[in-house]
Amino acid sequence: MNSIRNRHYTIFFSIALMLILLRIFQYGFLETDFLKNATFNPQNAVQKAAGTGSVTEGYKTDGFELYFVEKDGKTTPYAYFRKFGIWSRSYPADHNTQGITEAGSTLYYYWEVPLNSAEHVVLVTPDGDLIEPVLLDNGAGGTLPLYIVPDYKDHMGHYRFAAVGGDGALLPERADTVTGGKITVYRHEGDPANASGESLTVEEWESLPDERRELPALLREAASLLEGQTPLSQPLYVREETVPETVVQTVSNLESYLTLEKGNRPYAWTVRVQYRFELEGQNPNTVMVNRIDYRNASLYDKPEGENAVYALDMPKELKQLIEGHYGSRPNGVNE
């Protein structure tokens, strides 16, 4: 009787162990294309991938290696991490579209820095500490900042990319959600393919020699009228046939972040706010606001961000400016 019971226990524990090992195999290998990109020697693998290109060693630890391949005038990072004693390529890889690698308890970010016009950019942790980049020679006459986040699983949250001024202080966050980027005016008589208008940066608008330089200020004024308003509850009306449209659209890119979430792959992103002022069209006197801010809702929950539509009686000065300069509907869009 005891031998039968022991045999049952043995079978039970054997099955349980097999299930655990299968889960480890799936998590450690299959879900991240581990076996597909596995190698025993990362440097040899990079040399083979580079072909006639040149290879520069960027950074190496016991569990992470980063190289740069310069080929046909383009520089590409190649990153490897080690798990269970086997190396596997993390980037480039099907599952990794940004240069972010999780290697053991450490996370490495070696992708584009959003504030590329700033000379000194740090990563501000959720606790307010600063992570200085390791500047790496990319082998093509430039440098790439490598940001290292130790024990990242114990410090989940949003890490902000922040520019540092000449005095060593962090520069203020960008807060202009209306005119913090590009402004586009377009108009058509019913065929969007034949739209006309202009698409300029805020600085370009403000440097124009005529009344059009007032457009950014007028848009800020119009957007301020939305404060305290309740968005429309019904969806916008869309007719099957096209109608003449006159629209002013703004896009503002604000702060950029590296987000770490439990159960999700880390990702880098930028707060993006878009206003669409419809002066003429299927829904005249409305403003659509789209805000992408994954501090409020995860990329994995709302990748498209959040939309809100408001009714707005467009300010007289704004309508006069648009009608006065684009009423003749010049041919072509000035990009």
Image (cartoon, rainbow, N blue to C red):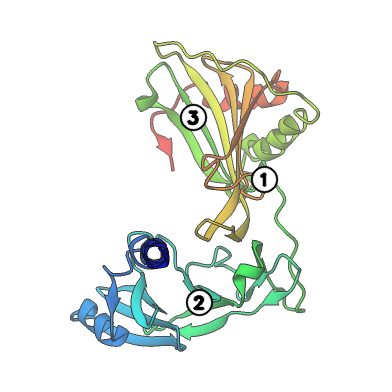
Q: Is residue 76 above or below residue 322?
A: below
Mark 2 Cα-neighbour bin, 10 Å: few <14, some 14–19, many ≥20: some
Element at label 1:
loop
Q: Disc 3 marks which residue?
A: 186
Residue receiving disc 1? 296
Label pair 2/1, CB-CB below 8 angstroms: no
Instruction: Say which of 214 and 8 sits in front.
Output: 8
Per the model, the C-alpha gap separating discs 3 and 1 is 32 Å
State how far apart marks 2 and 1 are (Cα): 28 Å
Mark 1 surroundings within 10 Å by alpha-carbon count, few (fewer than 14), some (14 through 19), many (20 or more)? few
| Quadrant assignment, res 6 | bottom left
Q: Which of the two residues, 281 or 327, is positioned nearer the viewer here? A: 281
Find residue 140 and report its horizontal and vertical position in percent.
37, 82
Can you name the residue that lies furthest to the left here? Answer: 52
Q: Amino acid at mark 3?
A: Tyr
Frontmost of labels 3 and 2 is 2
- What's the residue at 48%, 32% (across, down)? 197
Q: Residue at x 55, y 76 (%)?
A: 105
Residue 24 higher or lower than 88, as above or below: above
- In the picture of the structure, the residue carrying the numbered disc 2 is 104
Is residue 34 depicted above or below 279 in this figure? below
Instruction: Give percent across and percent down for residue 269.
Output: 55, 55
Q: Nearer the viewer, residue 97 or 182?
A: 97
Tell which circle, 3 or 2, labels the residue nearer the N-terminal end.
2
Q: Mark 3 and 1 residues: CB-CB less than 8 Å, in contact?
A: no
Q: Earlier in the sequence, mark 2 or mark 1?
A: 2
Is 184 situated left or right of 313 in this image?
A: left
Give the x, y percent position of residue 208.
Answer: 60, 44
